[in-house]
Image (cartoon, coloured by chain):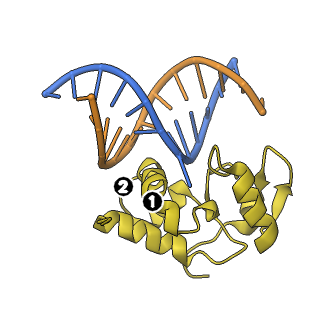
Chain colours: A yellow, B blue, C orange
Amino acid sequence: MTEIDDYSSRVLDVVDAIPAGRVMSYGDVAEYLGAGGPRQVGRVLARYGGGAPWWRVIHANGTPAPGHDAVALAHYLAEGTPLRSATLPVRVDMPKARWRGAS
DNA sequence: GTGTTGACAATCA
DNA sequence: CTGATTGCCAACA
């Protein structure tokens, strides 16, 4: 049984709320929650991200998670995420794809 | 309690 | 782009 902490649950909830074609940076999620930090967000995704669209959570510079960049790229192409580079290093057009809670 | 590590971020060279 | 440095917060040995 996977018991998820309250903080992790909130992180997953925010990630799950990100619409297709949009992304949020680790720091943005942490700031949106108003708790923890970008490292804690990445930690939660690494542990419980298996059931959430973790590829929509990327670095502040627009690159996806290390080791999963190819998987993330496939999702970006399938969801129509605005990319600045469709080849590695994968870069998402942050100013356009960046999503903030409610528009 | 201390030191290291980590799916981070920002700045500088 | 690579590498180094500092700041940040939490988990782990």
Give amino acid for label 2. Gly
Closer to the camera, A87 or B13? A87
Identify the residue at horizontal 43%, vertical 66% (top origin).
A11
Please identify the quarter of the rendering in which residue C12 is found: top left
Q: In which quadrant is the N terminus of chain A drawn?
A: bottom left
Q: Position of residue A98 (x, y in %)?
A: 67, 66
User: Mark 2 touching mark 1, by CB under 8 A?
Assistant: yes
Q: Position of residue B11 (x, y in %)?
A: 61, 35
Between disc 2 and disc 1, whose residue precedes?
1
Looking at the figure, which quarter contains the C terminus of chain A? bottom right
In the rendered image, which residue does mark 1 sit on? A30
- Residue in front for this viewpoint, A34 or A55: A55
Query: Which amino acid, by three-letter code, is at mark 1?
Result: Ala
Residue A96 in the image, given as x and y percentages of width and height: 76, 67
Label number found at residue A53: none
Q: In the displayed structure, does residue A53 sit left or right of residue C6?
A: right
Badge 1: residue crowd in 10 Å (few <14, some 14–19, many ≥20): many
The answer, for residue A6, to whether it is visible in the render is yes
| Looking at the image, residue A7 lies above or below residue C11 | below
Q: Which residue appears farthest toward the bottom when viewing the image?
A: A103
| Chain letter for the residue marked with disc 1 in the picture | A
What percent of the width, then of the height, locates residue B10? 59, 43
Mark 2: give few (<14), some (14-19) or many (20+) Cα within 10 Å: few
Q: Which mark is residue A36?
A: 2
Secondary element at image label 1: helix
Q: Residue at x 45, y 47 (%)?
A: A39
- Left or right relative to C9: residue A41: right
Toward the viewer: B9 or A87?
A: A87
At a point 70% along the width and 53% down the height, the residue shown is A62
Q: Residue furthest front?
A: A1
